[in-house]
Amino acid sequence: MQEHANLPLAMIETVTAAADWVIILPMILALMGSALLLMLRKSRGFNALLAVLFVIAIIASEAVLFGRVMAEGPVSMTMGRWLPPFGISFTADIFGAGFALTSALATLVVIVYMQMDREPGDNIDGQLAMVLLLLAGVTGSFLTGDFFNLYVWFEVMLIASFGLLVLGGSQMQIDGAVKYGFLNFLATTLFLMALGLTYALLGTLNMADIIGRAPQANQAVLAGIAALLILAFGMKAAAFPVNAWLPASYHAPPAAVSALFAGLLTKVGVFALLRAMVVLFPETRTLLEPVLIAIAAATLVIAPLGAIAETNLRRAIGFIVIGGIGVIVAGIAMPSVTGVAGSGFYIFHAILTMTALYLIAGLVERVTGETDSRNMGGLYAANSPLSIIFLVAVLAAAGIPPFLGFWPKLLLLEAGLERAGISAAEGGTVDWSGIVLVGALLINAFLTLVGGTRLWAHIFWRAGREGDQSEHQAQTIRKLTVKESWLGLGATMVLVAGIALAGLLPDGLFATARSGAGDLIDPSRYIAAVGLPDEAGPVDLDAELGAEEGTP
Amino acid sequence: MDFAIAILVGLFITVGVYFLLSRSIIRMLLGLTVLGNGVNLLIFTGGRLTRELAPIVPPGMEHAQGAVANPLPQALILTAIVIGFAMFSFLLVLALRAYQSLDADNTDNMRVAEPENGCRPPLSY
């Protein structure tokens, strides 16, 4: 034993503080809840009640966690009594805990909304179990502090989303699931490849440890790893050149499931990209910045054009979701505190607004009995509350001033102008990349507004379906049933009211986003929370394993 | 040894990508499996190929005696194999179901979710 006295301490000798368990409590609750719901899937009313209770418990534990992170800075817990970087760490920072909380809130709304769909013999028992499993995957991805663990949570999320996508088994769902399944599985495989290379180069997979070791590593290899990560997370997030799977699959499942996917899945992908580029490999990000700028600008401009050209309502909204991803990538391409704060703020906004858009689309499809906006029309007279919340959600997505989407875009425009150097330009050179991003953001806002309000005009304002000259309401339009009004419309209205309220009172969100971005750009508090030294070279696996070879 | 395995990884990934570019779902599935195994080998090589001895700590000792294999990549690959197998099984059943209900193994014939002549921009407003 004496011969190892020089080895660093590897085991945690003390018991984990009870308060620290709050970091993994949301995942434990979601996984246990999912298992329990799967066992009880036949008893429907009880199942729904149990799911709501579990999600409320998850929200409560995440609210406690978020409050603690806001007060004390990042909080970390390491599993299995191994000290970091050996044990698997969960580390909650402001963005991670905040997005986890927002996701759980959106999930609660979706679960309530889902209950209006249930009919005897509808063959979708087990849906709520998979919703909770999906929430476990999403929460885990937001809170984990270990790169390989992130991969595992991605797969948890992926398998749950497969299940939700095919549950019901219509032809369209099978078709959508094939495209969604293959491309997303390929994306996680590419991510796994990047992980293998990261381990080979740095000898560690703990995120805080990577931050300390990456600067001294071979930058050329790191650039390759970062490029793979951009491709993998870009596919998960549906950024421009690899976005085709999203409009091909998101309109296939029931509207509530689409809403859940649009709110949570792509945001997890883009947040992983944000963390990887801004926190883990900042030097490499600078090298790959032109790529990120090109992806952001192309996604920003091309996606809303799709929304304008598309006639299927939910597919058109899918393009608006992709446009939002472009906004977030724009912030990753300009990693000042303002830019990253804009990205984080936008993720918060997108989780809520995109969920709301799909929920409203589901109600519209229910009232009109159609999925194609060419066959809709005259809904304003039939259901005016629906037309108002749709307009609010569209204006929020486009970023019109009093609504929520405006504030993150304001931060990003500010970051872009700072970068372009126009505000301080006195004979100085102008940075064109900043101008390109500012231009793309403005064009995106304009095109999203055109696409969204055109949808609104077609569905609600126009007297009847396309080419219809009659001034009477179409025969196919029906009223929402009492159950649909209370559960479906009620849940959606609560969500939209929340979005509107958050848009009117953005001060706290601005401050939160700025301090969250500060922690990402200067991760010293994050590293200190995990309990690792600030600077350390890469573990030389060759030397370490080779040295052991020398001893007989 | 590292070089040989590295070339093998490259070969696996080439074959995987080649199969993935096919339109047939079953071929794409085989491609994903081969690609996944290539990635597993990559992680294995990334952990350095040193010794064939299992990293087992003898009773009463605090660490393994002498040179042993790096245990971490084995744990990573084990996780990846389990997950990859689950995904493979799911996608295989999905392919069968797609063949039964859509009557298509060729992705070009799967146009239910994306109708071929669907996208005519609305003309009003």
Image: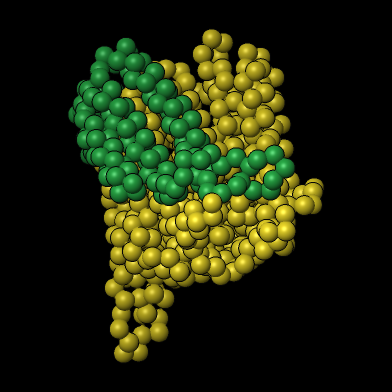
Chain identity for the colour green used in the image: B
Residue B93 in picture, x, y percent from top left: 39, 18
Color theme of the render: by chain
Residue in the image at 62% along x and 58% along y: A94
User: A139 and A442: which one is in front?
Assistant: A139
Residue extending furthest toward the bottom: A427
**Outermost residue toward the front in this view:** A552
Left/right placement of residue B109 relative to residue B1 reads: left
Q: Is residue A255 left or right of residue A502?
A: left
User: As displayed, is residue A162 above or below residue A292?
Assistant: above
Residue located 21% across and 30% down the image? B22
Residue B47 point in image, percent of width and height: 45, 48
Query: Residue sitting at 72 percent across and 42 percent down?
Result: B60
Q: Colour of chain A?
A: yellow
Rendered location of residue A27, percent (x, y):
64, 39
**Relative image position of residue B20 (x, y in whole percent):** 26, 33
- Relative horizontal placement of residue A361, taking residue A506 as reference (left or right): left
